[in-house]
Image (cartoon, helix red, strand yellow):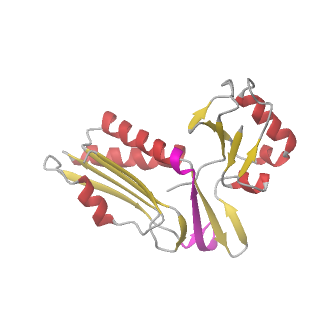
Amino acid sequence: MKVLAFGITKDILGKSEIQLRDFEGQTVGDLRSYLRNKHREFDQLNSLAIAVNEEYAQDHATLNESDVVALIPPVSGG
Amino acid sequence: MTKNIHITRETLSIDACRSLIAAPKNGGECFFVGTVRNVTKGERVEKLVFEAYEPMAIKEMHKIADTTLLNYEASTVVIHHRIGELHIGEIPVIIAVGAPHRDAAFKACRFAIDTLKETVPIWKKEFLESGEVWVSAHP
């Protein structure tokens, strides 16, 4: 599963894209917990939305190996 | 043209946006033009760098335009956003709305820029005298 990082999440991961395995059938919430455990900096963000295939996803949504996931820290366009 | 959505690294043009919303039924046009400010929280800003998750940002901008057309009596909506490096006074965003009457034009324009700032995956990094910071990332 491809995970894209933007804004400050790119700094936290140290790269703009990572590949994660074994998330088939797990939820967006599971991915969130995994990331928080691995990188404590995620806890310090104002918010962290997660998009699946270019749409905002709820924590209960189920992930597939072929999904493109994006980490969306607080947006600041305009 | 009913709506026009664009993300670019080029300079944004108010005239171009105006020509895109022109329609005989419009009795008024409302524009929001965002500009890069020289100070933030008392600190001098050198420049901003905008980054977008482009395909999703385009989708979210289309959703805003659709909702604007549906919920306000606007006839035309244009949302253009620039990304990359911008300096003081330059324009990162233009919202242009055409409507039969001014009240709808003002309200539609306000809704579009407010929603863009909440939902569209675009981020800005401020380059200050004291260093670099992703805007709104931390409390």
Which residue of the protein is positioned furthest toward the left in this rendering?
A: B24
Whether residue B67 is visible here, answered yes or no, is: yes
Q: Position of residue A45 (x, y in %)?
A: 73, 47
Front residue of A12 and A20: A20
In the rendered structure, the answer to whether residue B105 lies left or right of residue A74 reads: left
- The quarter of the displayed image where residue B11 is located: bottom left
Q: Residue at x 65, y 34 (%)?
A: A67
Q: Provide the residue span drawn in magenta.
A: B38-56
Counting the numbered discs, the total is 0
Residue at the image point whose x is 85% and y is 46% from the top: A40
Can you say whether B54 is above or below B129 in the image? above
Closer to the camera, B115 or A3?
Answer: A3
Residue B117 vertical position relative to residue B82 in the rendered view, above or below: above
B21 magenta-colored: no
Q: Is residue B73 left or right of residue A44?
A: left
Q: Look at the picture and state if B66 lies above or below B8.
A: above
Of B72 and B60, the residue lying toward us: B60
- Is residue B138 shown to the viewer in this render? no
